[in-house]
Image (spheres, rainbow, N blue to C red):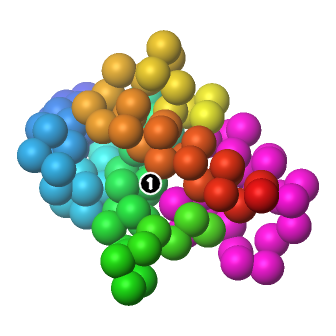
């Protein structure tokens, strides 16, 4: 159990380093590994940062897919979009999440909400 904890902490540290290098897919893989071994605190925040940035990299014709960024299906109604928006804002708000890339992910989610709410 203690060994799993150490491996999970190490995987989380690697994920944070990969975020600094903007390797969002690699960071997500390491965060998922850490979560699988032992769910330490902050992993939901770390994974949210990774998922938003990975989604932002999947551009279509040079444009963001706002639905992927906010993590809802394209046919989602406004209630579902707002619910997911509030969930992501709570995880990514820069005052509460100091993980590298969190502020940029927060801004993407806000922009996605603004775009989809129009």
Q: Is residue 14 above or below residue 115?
A: above
Q: Position of residue 106 (x, y in %)?
A: 49, 37
Q: Is residue 57 above or below residue 98?
A: below
Residue 116 in view in this figure: yes
* Image-quadrant location for residue 26: bottom left
- Is 117 one of the magenta-colored residues? no
Q: Position of residue 41 (x, y in %)?
A: 44, 26
Q: Which residues are magenta?
A: 68-88
Q: Position of residue 29 (x, y in %)?
A: 27, 60
Q: Is residue 15 above or below residue 81?
A: above
Residue reaching furthest top?
95
Q: Residue at x 80, y 48 (%)?
A: 82
Comparing 112 with 46, the one in front is: 112
Quarter containing the C terminus: bottom right
Q: Which residue is mark 1?
A: 52
Q: Residue at x 86, y 59 (%)?
A: 78
Relative placement, left or right, of 29 versus 39 is left
- 10 Å crowding of disc 1: few (<14), some (14-19), many (20+): many
Label the magenta part by its dominant secondary structure: helix
């Amino acid at each position: 159990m203690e060994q799993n904890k150490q491996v999970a902490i190490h995987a989380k540290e690697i994920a944070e380093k990969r975020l600094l290098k903007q390797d969002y897919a690699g960071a997500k893989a390491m965060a998922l590994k850490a979560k699988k071994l032992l769910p330490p605190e902050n992993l939901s925040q770390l994974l949210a940062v990774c998922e938003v940035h990975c989604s932002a990299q999947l551009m279509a014709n040079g444009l963001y897919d706002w639905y992927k960024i906010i993590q809802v299906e394209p046919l989602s109604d406004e209630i579902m979009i707002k619910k997911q928006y509030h969930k992501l804002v709570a995880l990514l708000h820069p005052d509460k999440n100091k993980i590298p890339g969190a502020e940029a992910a927060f801004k993407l989610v806000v922009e996605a909400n603004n775009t989809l709410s129009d």
